[in-house]
Image (cartoon, helix red, strand yellow):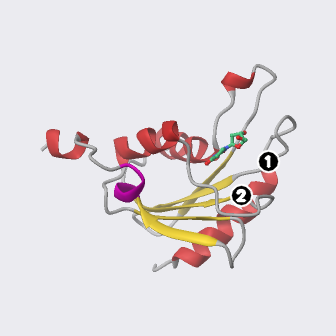
Amino acid sequence: MEIKMQDLFEKALIASKKSYSPYSKFPVGAALLLEDGSVITGVNIENRSFGATNCAERTALFTAVASGFRTFKAIAIATPTADYPVGPCGICRQVLSEFAPAETPVIFGCSNEKQVKTTLGELYPYDSLHELAK
Ligand code: THU
C-alpha cells in the first residue's frame, strides 16, 4: 500500500490530540511509516520532572521497536499549536538515526500549509552509524 507523505502528516496531526503536555501546552504527534504501509503513531508525554518528558518521535519509534518493527520508510511530525514548522530535537534525531538511514523522508509542520519536507540525513548529517555497521 502506497501512503503519501501528506497522509502520514495527517496521521501525525490526529495523533497529536492524544499528547500529554500539561506543562508546555505544546502538543506533538508523530507518525512512523512501516515497510508494509502501516503506521505507528506517538505523542509527547510530559512529566512534572521535566527531564523525564518523552518526545512524540521517540514515543512512536520506541512503540514500533517494542512491537517488533525495525525498518521505517518515513516519519511525519505535527506541532499544531506552533506558528511555524518545529523540527525534531537533537535527541530524537540521534535516536531516529539508529534505525532509519539518511535517505528516510521526514516531514514536519504545524499545518498542511506550513511544512518542511526533508530527509533524516539533512537533519542529522555526518552520521557514520550505517556506514560503520556495513
Ligand atoms: N517535543 C516533541 O515531542 N517533539 C519535538 O520535535 C519538539 C519538542 C515536545 C517536548 C515537550 O513535551 C514539548 O514538545 C515542548 O518542548
Q: Earlier in the sequence, mark 2 or mark 1?
A: 1
Q: Is residue 31 above or below residue 127?
A: below
Q: Is mark 2 within 8 Å of ligand 1?
A: yes
SS label for mark 2: loop
Q: Quadrant of ligand 1?
A: top right
Q: Which residue is mark 2?
A: 79
Where residue 17 sits, quadrant-wise, is bottom right
Q: Which residue is mark 1?
A: 26
Q: Estimate the x, y position of residue 65 in percent, counting from the top left.
A: 46, 42
SS label for mark 1: loop
Residue drawn 60% across and 41% down?
A: 59
Q: Is residue 124 above or below residue 106?
A: above
- Cβ atoms at labels 2 and 1 below 8 Å apart: yes
Q: Is residue 65 above or below residue 122?
A: above
Q: Is mark 1 within 8 Å of ligand 1?
A: yes
Give the crowd class for mark 2: few <14, some 14-19, many >=20 residues within 10 Å. Answer: many
Q: Is residue 27 left or right of residue 42?
A: right
Magenta-tinted stretch: 120-124
Q: Estimate the x, y position of residue 41 in percent, counting from the top left.
A: 62, 54
- Mark 1 is on which residue type? Phe
Cα separation, mark 2 vs mark 1, equals 7 Å
Residue 115 numbered mark, or none: none
- Most extreme residue toward the left is 134
Residue drawn 81% across and 40% down?
A: 21
